[in-house]
Image (cartoon, rainbow, N blue to C red):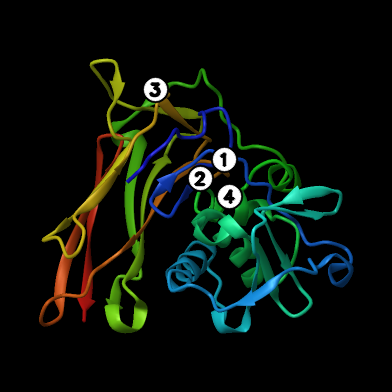
């Protein structure tokens, strides 16, 4: 995995997509007032890539909503990574008319961007409800700049919050889907590591430093490995900030978008183990069939 820097702890939104942790600026679009007038004329309709199924299931899982992925019409702008909308430049947008999602050329591989637009399609509305974009699905979907403003401002975090661990922190691990058939599902899964603050005040989680270098913030392993054995993620700043318990930003997440190879023979059960900043999450069993 080619991991880059995590978003600095004072900012909103870890962006993790397609095996790459990236801090590239993704400007999230809200629904435009006149979607027909602003729909990009050069957009080309496409069939959703195989990994979109896993990403849709993850968006359903975090939001608590359900929807039909096949009802969404997907478009891409060949050779263009952004396009104008409402006086700005965006990488993706959901249009209520026809339930359409348009992505810039590079957006097809940006899981957090795609899931942001998927969440709009599940909500069937524009705008950015705080509970969903900065709460239930924070870090799973990108939310920066106008999305944060639209959601009511950044979570309550601070660079001077006390460092926590032990009983004050809950480490979590989720795999979506937990049962898959490689032939029909294409083998794509999302592995999400999380850290949740249990205190009623802002807090920070320390990222271990070894010999002057950051040790992995989050990682997982597969036992036994099928096609891949796991991934790790590193960051350079020494902590991750969390909002008070129960508020937007109280849980921080890192999402790995990965793919299983088909088992050589019969259905196998894999055990996924993981940790967030040295705090071990309960393991998750995954059933994989050819």
Distance CA(mark 1)–CA(mark 4): 11 Å
Q: Position of residue 289 (x, y in %)?
A: 21, 80
Dot 4 surroundings within 10 Å: few (below 14), some, or many (20 or more)?
many
N-term-proximal mark, 3 vs 2 = 2
| Marks 3 & 2, CB-CB < 8 Å contact | no
N-term-proximal mark, 4 vs 2 = 2
Q: Nearer the viewer, mark 1 or mark 3?
A: 1
The residue labelled by disc 3 is 238
At x 46%, y 42%, the residue is: 252
The residue labelled by disc 2 is 15
Dot 2 surroundings within 10 Å: few (below 14), some, or many (20 or more)?
many
The residue labelled by disc 1 is 24
N-term-proximal mark, 3 vs 4 = 4
- SS at mark 1 in the image: loop
Distance CA(mark 1)–CA(mark 2): 8 Å
Distance CA(mark 4)–CA(mark 2): 6 Å
Q: Nearer the viewer, mark 1 or mark 4?
A: 1
Q: Quadrant of the C terminus?
A: bottom left
Distance CA(mark 3)–CA(mark 4): 22 Å
Distance CA(mark 3)–CA(mark 2): 18 Å
Q: Position of residue 251 (x, y in %)?
A: 46, 44
Dot 3 surroundings within 10 Å: few (below 14), some, or many (20 or more)?
some
User: Toward the viewer: 193 or 87?
Assistant: 87
Give the label on residue 142, or none: 4
At x 68%, y 47%, the residue is: 27
| Marks 4 & 2, CB-CB < 8 Å contact | yes
Q: Position of residue 4 (x, y in %)?
A: 42, 36
N-term-proximal mark, 1 vs 4 = 1
Residue 106's place in the image compared with 145, above or below, is below
């Amino acid at each position: 995995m080619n991991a880059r820097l995590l978003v600095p702890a004072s900012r909103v939104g870890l962006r993790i997509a397609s095996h790459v942790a990236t801090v590239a600026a993704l400007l999230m679009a809200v629904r435009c007032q006149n979607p027909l007038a602003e729909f990009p004329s050069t957009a080309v309709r496409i069939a959703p890539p195989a990994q979109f199924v896993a990403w849709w299931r993850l968006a359903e899982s975090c939001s608590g909503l359900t929807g039909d992925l096949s009802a969404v019409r997907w478009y891409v702008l060949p050779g263009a990574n952004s396009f104008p909308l409402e006086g700005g430049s965006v990488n993706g947008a959901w249009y209520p008319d026809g339930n359409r999602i348009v992505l810039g050329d590079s957006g097809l591989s940006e899981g957090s961007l795609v899931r942001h637009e998927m969440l709009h399609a599940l909500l069937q509305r524009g705008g950015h409800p705080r509970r969903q974009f900065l709460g239930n699905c924070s870090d799973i979907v990108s939310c920066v700049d106008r999305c944060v403003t639209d959601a009511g401002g950044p979570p309550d975090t601070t660079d001077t919050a006390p460092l926590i661990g032990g009983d004050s922190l809950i480490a979590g691990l989720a795999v979506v889907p937990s049962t898959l058939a490689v032939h029909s599902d294409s083998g794509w899964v999302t592995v999400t590591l999380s850290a949740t603050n249990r205190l009623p005040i802002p807090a920070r989680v320390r990222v271990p430093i070894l010999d002057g270098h950051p040790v992995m913030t989050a990682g997982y392993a597969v036992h036994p490995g099928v096609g891949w054995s796991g991934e790790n993620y590193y960051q350079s700043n020494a902590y991750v900030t969390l909002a008070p318990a129960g508020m937007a930003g109280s849980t921080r997440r890192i999402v790995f978008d990965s793919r299983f190879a088909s088992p050589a023979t019969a259905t196998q059960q894999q055990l996924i183990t993981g940790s967030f900043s040295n705090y071990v999450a309960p393991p998750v069993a995954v059933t994989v069939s050819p």
